[in-house]
Image: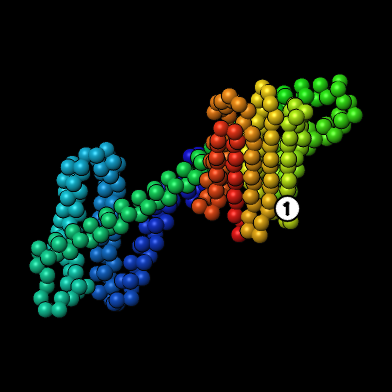
């Protein structure tokens, strides 16, 4: 990425890692001896790290072009050849350049290691570097992948929230304006209160769009305004009860966690005829918040699943309040639809 910070460049990251590795090996060599022994150690360490670095980046190429493309046989053969090549280089360099690792690896039994033992030691050094680098590669890739999934999930939830707000704004505002028009003709003295409720809803929409959290009291006020405006389109024989008990209204809460259930009540309760009953209670306990809704279902009413309300609520519940402590329970019979949302803050 052109605008990525300097430290996020792959070359810079790898350079820092190798600088740390070289510094560590240099300190170890300085600690084990002096004079010719130290010089010998520095020469061998330089050669070893050079071979390991080449083997690591060659192995990265094999991982990308063979293993991750499921060419397992070719990958195994190529990796064995790579390890053998690295071991041969180290062994030959030891013989030709007189990098006598006998002085660095004194055997308990005395004499110098045989050629086969030197080859095995060199191969082990190469394998160790490949295994360590491969683990680091996939651990980092897993972390990056997890962060990307989290970012995509957050973006999806933000999009769903925006769509949910848009859905509320469009459909609800259209119905409310029609209801306000009818109210202005039938009961103009009730218009000021209804307009204040509508203004409260719009203010909430603007404020919550700029905030990651609202308060329980703010959400309850939003529900009260929403319910007050929805009641305008109910028949005279309909009953709507909204009760709250909020001893700590300043408790933070993710926005629009409660509205989908309340909206669902009015969606299911309003039928072509008959009495409509809606009961909504919002109770704050010592440890959390409980929203209970209960609405009647008109006879022969078959609501079709549509909208983003409940799916968006489930997604937001999983994101902001994960775990079995937070629950959404839905229950439908032929005459009633009940829902309970339980959030635990402590």
Q: In the image, 284: left or right of 109?
A: right
Name the residue nearer the viewer: 165 or 122.
165
Q: Position of residue 338 (x, y in %)?
A: 60, 40
* SS at circle 1: loop
Q: In the image, 193: left or right of 240?
A: right
Number of marks drawn: 1
Q: In the image, 286: left or right of 17?
A: right
- Residue at the spot x=20%, y=61% of the render? 124
278 vs 245: above or below: above
Q: In the image, 88: left or right of 259?
A: left
Location of the C terminus by quadrant is: bottom right
Q: Position of residue 102 (x, y in %)?
A: 17, 72
Q: Can you see residue 303?
A: yes
Q: Which residue is mark 1?
A: 246
> Which colour scheme appears in the figure?
rainbow
User: Badge 1: few (under 14), some or many (20 or more) residues near its Cα, within 10 Å?
Assistant: some
124 vs 207: above or below: below
Quarter of image, res 42: bottom left
Q: Position of residue 243 (x, y in %)?
A: 73, 46
Name the residue nearer the viewer: 314 or 72.
314
- Residue at the spot x=29%, y=77% of the render? 33
Name the residue nearer the viewer: 149 or 174.
174
Q: Position of residue 249 (x, y in %)?
A: 73, 52
- Residue at the spot x=14%, y=64% of the render? 118
């Amino acid at each position: 990425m052109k605008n990525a910070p300097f430290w996020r460049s792959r070359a810079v990251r790898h350079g820092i890692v190798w600088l740390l590795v070289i510094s560590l090996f240099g300190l170890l060599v300085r600690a084990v001896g002096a004079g010719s022994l130290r010089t010998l150690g520095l020469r061998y360490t330089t050669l070893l790290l050079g071979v390991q670095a080449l083997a690591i980046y060659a192995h990265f190429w094999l991982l990308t072009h063979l293993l991750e493309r499921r060419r397992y046989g070719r990958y195994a053969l190529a990796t064995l050849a790579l390890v053998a090549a690295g071991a041969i280089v180290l062994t030959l360099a030891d013989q030709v350049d007189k990098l006598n690792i006998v002085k660095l690896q004194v055997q308990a039994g005395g004499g110098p290691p045989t050629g086969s033992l030197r080859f095995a030691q060199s191969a082990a050094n190469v394998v160790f570097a490949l295994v360590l680098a491969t683990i680091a590669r996939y651990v980092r890739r897993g972390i990056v992948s997890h962060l990307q999934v989290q970012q995509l999930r957050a973006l999806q939830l933000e999009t769903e929230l925006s769509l949910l707000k848009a859905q509320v704004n469009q459909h609800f505002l259209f119905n409310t304006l029609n209801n306000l028009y009818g109210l202005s003709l039938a009961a103009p003295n009730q218009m000021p209160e209804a307009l204040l409720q509508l203004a409260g809803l719009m203010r909430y929409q603007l404020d919550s769009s700029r905030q990651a959290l609202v308060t329980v009291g703010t959400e309850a006020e939003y529900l009260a305004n929403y319910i007050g405006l929805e009641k305008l389109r109910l028949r005279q024989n309909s009953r709507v009860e909204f009760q709250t008990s909020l001893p700590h209204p300043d408790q933070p809460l993710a926005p629009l966690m409660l509205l989908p259930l309340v909206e669902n009540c009015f969606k299911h309760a309003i039928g072509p005829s008959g009495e409509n009953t809606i009961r909504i209670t919002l109770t704050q306990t010592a440890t959390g918040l409980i929203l209970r809704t209960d609405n009647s279902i008109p006879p022969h009413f078959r609501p079709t699943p549509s909208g983003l309300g409940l799916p968006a609520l489930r997604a937001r519940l999983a994101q902001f309040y994960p775990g079995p402590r937070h629950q959404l329970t839905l229950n439908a019979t032929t005459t009633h639809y009940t829902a309970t949302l339980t959030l635990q803050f402590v």
